[in-house]
Image (spheres, grey):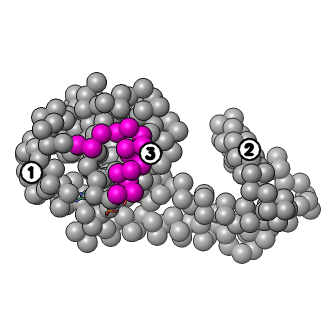
Amino acid sequence: MKNILFFGGGNIAQSVIEGLIKSGYKRNNIFFIDRNTKNKKKLEKLKIKEFSRDKTDQISFFFLCVKPKDALNSFKEIKQLKKNAKVISFVAGIKSNKYIKIDETTKFMRAMPNTSSRYGLGITALFNSTFSIEDRKFIDKLFNKVGMVIELNKEIEMDQFTGLVGSGPAYFFYILKVYEKELLKMCGNDNRKVNEIMVNLLKGVSMSINYNNDLDALVTMVASKKGTTEAGLDSFKKNKLNKYFKDGLRSAVKRSKEISNEF
Ligand SMILES: NC(=O)c1ccc[n+]([C@@H]2O[C@H](COP(=O)([O-])OP(=O)(O)OC[C@H]3O[C@@H](n4cnc5c(N)ncnc54)[C@H](OP(=O)(O)O)[C@@H]3O)[C@@H](O)[C@H]2O)c1
């Protein structure tokens, strides 16, 4: 099993690390570097070792998992640790050529996972810039351990993937907050009950999609003429929920494109 290092041990690094551990990847083969005390503590609780410089030669792959503002400096720090480091960037927006400009010989690829990797249900897009076929295959296999993998042929597709899928879980959590509020009223503020209702409802939704990918047909199965569902759906339509949701998704994709020009 190869040694891997997460440079930046925040939200997404923790999700992928937890998913890898659940899939059988050995904790001993995972290291991290982070300056944030809270994140350090979380990783120490997961029994992940903080990286020590004497181990540099033993690290096969470095995952760059910092916010875009810290990305290029962190990349330089990795290169100072190990000149020929192989780097996989999780960073939204910033394109491969920005890193390759810093070191033209660098072995580099991009990955865009999402937080569902923690449960083995991740969706990770990969775009290879300069990795060898063998190394790319290893990374592909690694992310297959925490969910599904989508290989992108063009880097530009990464912006769409970032806005739609990388950010995806948050859209549904956000919308569910409205639902949760109404359920809490119905259940006398019983949080556990509401949580259970939401989990079962979403499990049912995901099983239904798995069983039948025709979303219109699934809606029709629930909504009857002049019934309650139809009243709800009509109100969504009248208030242009579709348009606002689409606008939100497009704003996220646009933001991913903008980030690249900011650094
Ligand atoms: N969150 C997601 O769902 C998700 C999904 C896909 C991709 N991504 C991408 O992954 C990247 C990380 O996102 P995140 O949500 O995991 O961020 P995060 O929770 O803020 O984690 C980043 C961590 O890196 C640390 N860090 C930054 N620069 C460092 C340095 N030079 N030395 C040591 N530690 C350093 C940060 O410390 P400080 O807090 O002190 O700055 C923080 O603990 C972003 O670029 C994002 O676009 C995120």
The circle drawn on residue 137 is none
Left or right of 30? Residue 41 is: right
Residue 148 image position (x, y, % from top left) = 46, 36
C-alpha gap between disc 2 and disc 1: 49 Å
The quarter of the rendering in which ligand 1 is drawn is bottom left
Region in magenta: 37-51
- Specify the quadrant of the image occupied by residue 149: top left
Residue under label 1: 80
Residue under label 3: 15
Residue 224 image position (x, y, % from top left) = 89, 54
Question: Dot 3, how many residues are within 10 Å of its Cα: few (below 14), some (14-19), or many (20+)?
Answer: many
Helix, strand or loop at label 1? It is: helix
Q: Pick whichever of labels 3 and 1 is earlier in the sequence.
A: 3
Q: What's the residue at 35%, 51% (across, down)?
A: 40
Helix, strand or loop at label 2? It is: helix
Left or right of 185? Residue 95 is: left
The amino acid on which the numbered mark 2 sits, given as a three-letter code, is: Asn
The amino acid on which the numbered mark 1 sits, given as a three-letter code, is: Gln
Q: Quadrant of the N terminus?
A: top left
Left or right of 207? Residue 45 is: left
C-alpha gap between disc 3 and disc 2: 22 Å
Q: Nearer the viewer, residue 191 or 115?
A: 191
Q: Is residue 172 magenta?
A: no
Q: Nearer the viewer, residue 174 or 155?
A: 174
The amino acid on which the numbered mark 3 sits, given as a three-letter code, is: Ser
What's the magenta bit mostly, secondary-structure-wise? helix
Q: Quadrant of the C terminus?
A: bottom left
Residue 46 image position (x, y, % from top left) = 42, 40
Q: Is residue 127 above or below residue 228?
A: above
Left or right of 261? Residue 236 is: right
Q: What's the residue at 11%, 47% (across, down)?
A: 81
